[in-house]
Amino acid sequence: LAWMAGFQASLVLAAALLGDGLALVGAHVMLWSLPLSTLVGVAAVSVLERSSGSDDYSSELPGPLLRTAGALWLIGGFAAIGLPPFFGFWGRRWLFEGLRDLAPWGLPALLAAGVLLMSVVLVPIGRFWTPLRPDRLMAVPRFGPQLIGGIAVALLVCLGTAPLIAWQLWLQALPLAPGAAPTTQIAALGYAVLGVLIGLGGLLLLRLPSARTIAPERDEQPVRLGPDGLSAELAPLALLGRAGSPLRLLWDALEWSSNTLRTVMLIFEQRYYLFGVLLVLVVLMLLMAQ
């Protein structure tokens, strides 16, 4: 979640620093998309927190709550990445156009960051959408994080499919913004259809059965660690406590050097301080005499 928010914040800064008209408009669009997508991700994380706690989210989780949290997490992640039909797509598109005109060397870095963010979003999905467990079924609450996440998702989709609403409200009043909207409603609908097709294709891929079968080999035997094996595994730790071990010798050397340094400091700090000063003065006088 922090990675998602940080990625979008860095894009807002990059678009604002370009100073171009379309890039500036894209910075404001992503500045509005950032809290909405983050709110959707927070709703998903809060469902996990209420269901499992903060120690381990991969154990004893109810099925329906996992499916809801997984859907919210995926939508928030896709909005942060900038896929259609979410509102963050337009900010990313206008930032790309500004980079193409002013700093094309930044496009590969931005694409690489997007791929990394995609991996961050997709990693927890395999745990969110696990098979249902009949012994752990829980009803999804009607009001709660799902309602808040649903409102944020509705705003993201509404502004993503009709970006001209945002343009008429505040985007055209920005400094350095172009006079006309850099898109049409037909193009917005086309991108929305493309986003729906991407989502349906992803769901079909996730529902495909895995062709890989995990089965033990014939020559493999199950291994169980007994008490004798446990002692053998802990033997390297016991070597660290031996008196003749290298770490023990190092500790003794550190103690001896500390005591020696303490004695030297005591000599020069207390009764022998003036003697040391006089000795230094005598040495200086001999050097000057030569």
Image: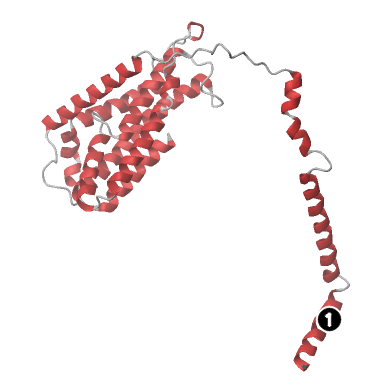
Q: Nearer the viewer, residue 141 or 115?
A: 115
Left or right of residue 69, residue 281 in this image: right
**Residue for point 55% across, 11% down:** 218
Residue 148 visible from this viewpoint: no
Query: In this picture, is 174 found above or below 188?
Result: below
How far across and how far down the image is residue 210, in percent? 39, 15
Q: What residue is drawn where x is 27% and y is 29%?
A: 155
Side of 202 relative to 22 (left or right): right
Q: Quadrant of residue 126?
A: top left
Quadrant housing the C terminus: bottom right
Please identify the quarter of the rendering in which residue 208 is found: top left
Q: For residue 113, which quarter of the picture?
A: top left
Which amino acid, by three-letter code, is at mark 1?
A: Leu
Q: Position of residue 249 (x, y in %)?
A: 80, 48
Which quarter shows the N terminus?
top left
Image location (x, y in percent) of residue 222: 62, 13
**Mark 1 Cα shell of 10 Å, populated few (<14), some (14-19), many (≥20):** few
Instruction: Return the residue found at the far bottom.
Output: 289
Q: Which type of secondary structure does the marked residue at label 1 adopt?
A: helix
**Relative vertical location of residue 178 with respect to residue 162 in this rendering, above or below:** below
Q: Nearer the viewer, residue 13 or 200?
A: 200
Q: Residue furthest front?
A: 219
Residue 270: percent from left, percent from top: 86, 70
Of residues 146 and 53, the one nearer the viewer is 53
Query: In this figure, which residue is indicated by the disc labeled 1?
Result: 279
Give the residue drawn at x 26%, y 39%: 92
